[in-house]
Image: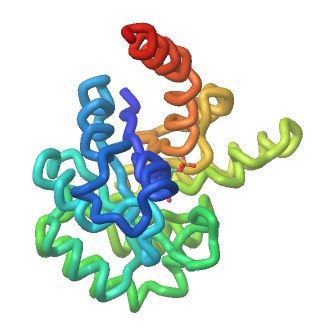
Amino acid sequence: MIRLGVNIDHIASLRQARYRGTPTAAVPEPDPLTAARLCLEAGAHSLTVHLREDRRHIQDADVVKIADRFRARLNLEMAATPAMVELALKIRPAEVCLVPENRAEVTTEGGLDAVGQEKALQPVVQKLRAAGIRVSLFIDPDPQQVAAAALLAPVIELHTGSFADASEKERPPQLLRLEKASHQAHGLKLQVNAGHGLRLSNLPALLALPHLHTLNIGHSLVCHALTVGLGQSVRDFLRAIEKK
Ligand code: PXP
C-alpha cells in the first residue's frame, strides 16, 4: 500500500496572508494543528511541514504544537543549516527531509545535490540520526544522486516536479527517469518516497512507479479541499445569516 503524507504548509500560507506579524496563538484561522488532525482522521499516514528560512508559511510555534500532538507522524522538511538542525533536535520529529532552499524560490525548485554536498551533509545526517530521527533526502531522479544519497540516508524522496510539469508528450521520459531511479534506490535498500506537483490528474500515471512507499502531496490537495468544501462553506454562512 502506498502511503499518503499531507503537506499542510499552505494551510499556514492562507493564515499568513491575513495575519502575518500576529502571534500564531492569537490567530484563529486556519489552524495548521486542526488541519493536521483532520488529515490524520481522514486516513493520511503522515504530515509534512516545511519550516522555511523566511517563515513564509509554517511558523516555529506551529511545528512545536504539531509535534507535541503527532510527533510519530511528523515529517519536518528543512534546509541542512545549523539553525534548522538545532531546531529539529529540539522538536524531534519522527522524520526530517533535507531539501535545498533558495530564498527567492516560490517553492522547492530542484533536488538536493547529494553528490556535491556529500561532505557537508554527512555530519548533519549523522546528528539527526543519532537523535533517533529518520532522515530522508529530497533528490532529483538522477542515478548519481541516488547513489550518493544511499551513502548518507535510509530514505530518499524523488522530486516529481519535472514529471508534474511535463506536457503529455514529455511525460513518458520523465516517468522513465523516475522508474529507473526508484529501481536503483530499491536495489540500494533505500525507502522511496516521492513528491512535488502531484495532483489528482497526474497521480494515475505516477502510480505506475515501482517501490513507492509514501507520496507527499500539498498544494493541490489543499486546493482540492477548497474546491470541494467551498459550497458547504457558503451554505453554512447563508444559514448563519438567515438566523437573524
Ligand atoms: N515534498 C517536498 C520535499 C516538497 O518540498 C514539497 C513542496 O513543499 C512537497 C513534497 C509537496 O509539493 P506540492 O505542494 O507541490 O504537492
Nearest the eye: 16 or 220: 16
Q: How many labels does the image show?
A: 0
Nearest the eye: 80 or 175: 80
The residue positioned 28% from the left and 59% from the top of the image is: 24
Is 80 on the left-hand or right-hand side of 131?
A: right
Residue 216 in picture, x, y percent from top left: 45, 45
Is 217 on the left-hand or right-hand side of 29?
A: right
In the rendered view, tell whether residue 8 sits above or below residue 2: below
Q: Which residue appears farthest toward the right when viewing the image?
A: 169
Is 123 on the left-hand or right-hand side of 230?
A: left
Is 173 on the left-hand or right-hand side of 89?
A: right
Q: Which colour scheme is used?
A: rainbow
| Quadrant location of the N terminus in the rendered image | top left
The residue positioned 78% from the left and 40% from the top of the image is: 172
| Quadrant location of the C terminus in the rendered image | top left
The quarter of the displayed image where residue 215 is located:
top left
In the rendered view, tell whether residue 17 sits above or below residue 130: above
The residue positioned 52% from the left and 48% from the top of the image is: 195
Nearest the eye: 172 or 25: 25
Residue 129 in picture, x, y percent from top left: 19, 71
Residue 238 appears in the rendering: yes
Residue 157 in picture, x, y percent from top left: 46, 56
The quarter of the displayed image where residue 52 is located:
bottom left
Residue 185 appears in the rendering: no
The residue positioned 15% from the left and 51% from the top of the image is: 71
Residue 148 in picture, x, y percent from top left: 47, 74
In the rendered view, tell whether residue 228 sits above or below residue 171: above
Nearest the eye: 14 or 149: 14
